Each structure stands twice: as structure tokens, then as C-alpha cells.
Image (spheres, helix red, strand yellow):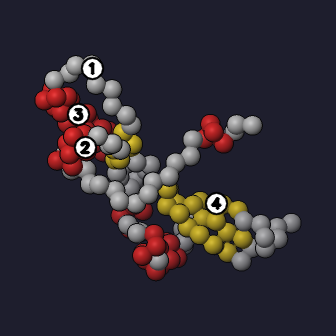
Amino acid sequence: MQTRHDIHVRPARKGDEKSILEWSAGSYEKNLFDPKVLFYPSTFTLCAFDDAGPLLFMPVQQPLFMDSLAFRPGLDPGRAGLALKTMFQAVITQGYIKGNGEVYFAASEPTVAAIAERHGFEKFLLPVYRVKLQDLEKS
């Protein structure tokens, strides 16, 4: 038997849309809600609930995240920049094909960051957190 202390998670259902939009818009300053995320083909929305009903809705988008760069040692900087530009174009194309709404790229080197900004990437000013699932299972 479920008690009020039990919290479960289910996919959002038809009829949850109004609550999702109202709750998200009502706390924009805290969550920076972008309603377009709900309409990315690869986004799904989850609902945490107890016996009194929904507690939290969370859209989960599946952006592409470009990871580290491995340039050929000694590669001319101009050729490296062109290779990076070409890679950006390829990944963005994959995003369109797969229905992802966004592409992320982490850059620590200023020249690489400048190239990313010249090609449409914007600097993300919020802290980003990650969890490596394999680390959750370490004893």
C-alpha cells in the first residue's frame, strides 16, 4: 500500500500539459524554463507524484553533447579551425536528423571557445553538473 511519503515517477500524461506550463512559467526565475524544449522530438517529460497527485514535472531533453577534441599533433591552427567548423556542421546536421533540439559543446581553450561562438554557440552561464552512471555503482 502506498503512503503519502512514497514518491514515484511516471511519464507525463495527456491532461498534464496545463500544469506543466503553469508550474514552469510560474517559477521561471528559478528554472529558466524554455517552452520550446517541450516540443523537441526527442524530449520526454516525467512526473514525480504521491497519492495527492503530481509534485514535480521535468522535461528531459536529449541534446547532443560534443565532447573533447583530439587534433592531430602539429596540425596547422587554420586547418584545425576549419576541421572544428566542419565538425560543428556535421553534429548540428545529426541533431536535426535525430530530433535533438540543442547541441552542447564544452570548451576550455579560449581559441576553441571563440571558434564555437563564431559558429552560433552561445556561452552557457549556469553551473553544469554531471553524474557518471558507472560511478554510482562503485562499492
Distance from label 4 to label 1 (Cα)?
46 Å
**Place of residue 29 in the rendered image (x, y in percent of width and height, measured from the top left):** 42, 76
| Residue that protrudes farthest toward the right in the picture | 1
**Counting residues from the N terminus, which is met first, the one under dot 4 or under dot 1?**
4
**Place of residue 77 in the rendered image (x, y in percent of width and height, measured from the top left):** 16, 28
Query: What residue type is disc 4 on?
Result: Arg
In the image, which is nearer the foreground, mark 2 or mark 1?
A: 2
In the image, which is nearer the foreground, mark 3 or mark 1?
A: 1
Name the residue at 20% across, 36% down.
85
Residue 72's mark? 1
Element at label 2: helix
Q: Is residue 48 left or right of residue 89?
A: right
- Find disc 2 in the rendering and name its residue: 110
The 10 Å Cα crowd at callout 4, few under 14, some 14 to 19, many 20 or more, is few
| Residue that protrudes farthest toward the left in the picture | 78
Distance from label 2 to label 4 (Cα)?
42 Å
Which quadrant: the N terminus? bottom right
Q: Relative to 49, does residue 85 appear above or below in the rendering?
A: above
State the image quarter where residue 133 is shown.
Answer: top right
Name the residue at 63% across, 72% down.
55
**Counting residues from the N terminus, which is met first, the one under dot 2 or under dot 1?**
1
- Find disc 3 in the rendering and name its residue: 84
Q: Is residue 40 left or right of residue 14?
A: left
Element at label 4: strand
Distance from label 3 to label 1 (Cα)?
12 Å
